[in-house]
Image: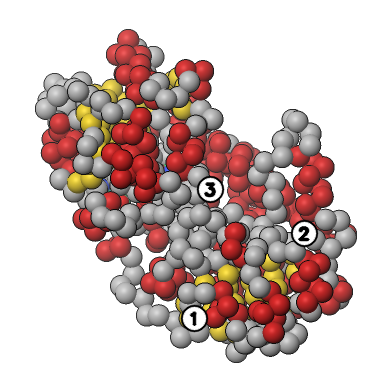
Amino acid sequence: MVKICCIGAGYVGGPTMAVIALKCPEIQVAVVDISVPRISAWNSDTLPIYEPGLDEVVKKCRGKNLFFSSDVEKHVSEADIVFVSVNTPTKTQGLGAGKAADLTYWESAARMIADVSKSNKIVVEKSTVPVKTAEAIEKILTHNSKGINFQILSNPEFLAEGTAIQDLFEPDRVLIGGRETPEGQKAIKALRDVYAHWVPMDRIICTNLWSAELSKLAANAFLAQRISSVNAMSALCEATGADVSQVSHAVGKDTRIGPKFLNASVGFGGSCFQKDILNLVYICECNGLPEVANYWKQVIKVNDYQKARFVNQIVSSMFNTVSGKKIAILGFAFKKDTGDTRETPAIDVCKGLLGDKAMLSIYDPQVSEEQIQRDLSMNKFDWDHPVHLQPMSPSSMKQVSVVWDAYAATKDAHGICILTEWDEFKTLDYQKIYDNMQKPAFVFDGRNIVDVAKLREIGFIVYSIGKPLDEWLKDMPAVA
Ligand code: NAI
């Protein structure tokens, strides 16, 4: 029986391994993590992450061929294939701080694999890593190998949070990179055989190691670039009276461009886009390519500009001050159908409003009060490190209250900011909400999900990203 072990029971390790276990009943899959609470949660009825469809998959396999354990060394030593899916945050200190990937967690996982291994292993990079990481890992493993053969593969993960299970069931592609030696090719085949249980062969792409590593960074950079492109257009739409949805629709009809990922918003978030682009920028700089680095840097600058522009629009619309005013924040996760708040634009928007002394009442269907308070008091880039390395129990902010219902959040509020596109925000009783708010009542829709005409009819002053401006807002240009 083939044994797989995955180091790192996070957003990637948990769902990917659960799907492998489901699709390959004859393979034994162990997911291990140094975080005991995380492993306990995977073994409980309340999984540590929210992802549609995940509960069912885990319930079907857990205890049969899927196991979650904090006994990292035992499962690694028994495995034939070891996936490494640990976090790869942005460095906060030293050389490359604020840009380069911090590979501390990766390196310690590699050293541990070398320490505990007694048989040959295929080691698979699942985490997103800088190009040439495999070479470093290979060196660590071979210099500590005690005669054991390690083959390194790069198998970056392309799932998107919120649709992870669907993406894993029917991936656009699975990418496997390996050495171009007979042993490397044999290892590629072994991993390809795992995916071939459910992924059509023409969707399994095999490349060399460096192409696989770089393809993941490139894919995320291209995706984020699309969002920044449409967001840059949204500012021009507001200035000219064009409607960004109409522009996106017209642009996306070109089959060379395509319609997906062209929605204007308050900005992209999530644990990957910014981190991976910063990483790409750093690699370009290290390779003497400053023009290429600057090109990609701009994608992040436009994203920061969009968040600042949104805050500016709110403050300038509300008579140039939100001091002491209650503002309802609907949605805190970085997108719908996930409870993940890593790099969510809501953090920057809330911090901007708090800077102007607003009183925030926040509601998100999946994010806890503790998480929101922690996010709002954390320094940039600290979030991707283990809890014990994060600032000591940050004091909860008096200006922030977290409530469990959109109606409670909006009661007596002066304005509403929609920051996550949760479906339930589309069908709220906005008449009831309006009746319970201070007047004039404002809605700032950062995801373009509300029916603007209907809300204006009720009496709201509505700002929607990239849409023709409300008469009220026309004289108040937002300048970031
Ligand atoms: P995560 O932070 O949710 O999970 C990582 C886990 O690794 C944590 O539970 C941590 O305790 C554990 N860990 C760290 N060092 C360890 C060690 N030495 N031994 C055992 N466990 C250890 O991170 P997430 O989101 O799963 O991401 C993992 C990697 O996958 C990152 O490189 C990320 O860029 C990449 N990725 C993430 C995607 C996402 O949507 N979240 C999508 C595609 C790739």
Residue 393 at x, y percent in the picture: 32, 74
Viewer-closest of 282 and 214: 214
Residue 440 at x, y percent in the picture: 75, 85
Q: Which numbered disc flags the more N-terminal residue, 2 or 3?
A: 3
Toward which corner of the image does residue 129 lie, by quadrant? Answer: top left
Query: Dots 3 and 1: beta carbons under 8 Å?
Result: no
Q: Residue at x 15, y 33 (%)?
A: 77
Is ligand 1 closer than 8 angstroms to the Cβ of mark 2? no
Q: Which numbered disc flags the more N-terminal residue, 2 or 1?
A: 1
Q: Residue at x 33, y 54 (%)?
A: 47
Task: Answer above or below: position of 387 versus 206.
Answer: below
Q: Which numbered disc flags the more N-terminal residue, 3 or 1?
A: 3
| Quadrant in the picture for the N terminus | top left
Residue 95 visible in this rendered orientation of the protein: no
Residue type marked 1: Val
Kindly report the distance in space between the C-alpha atoms of the residues bearing marks 3 and 1: 28 Å
- Label 2, on which residue? 466
Residue 450 at x, y percent in the picture: 71, 64
- Label 1, on which residue? 400
Q: Residue at x 11, y 27 (%)?
A: 118
Q: Residue at x 46, y 49 (%)?
A: 52
Kindly report the distance in space between the C-alpha atoms of the residues bearing marks 2 and 3: 22 Å
- Label 3, on which residue? 273
Secondary structure found at label 3: helix
Residue type marked 3: Phe
Residue type marked 2: Gly
Q: Nearer the viewer, mark 3 or mark 1?
A: 1
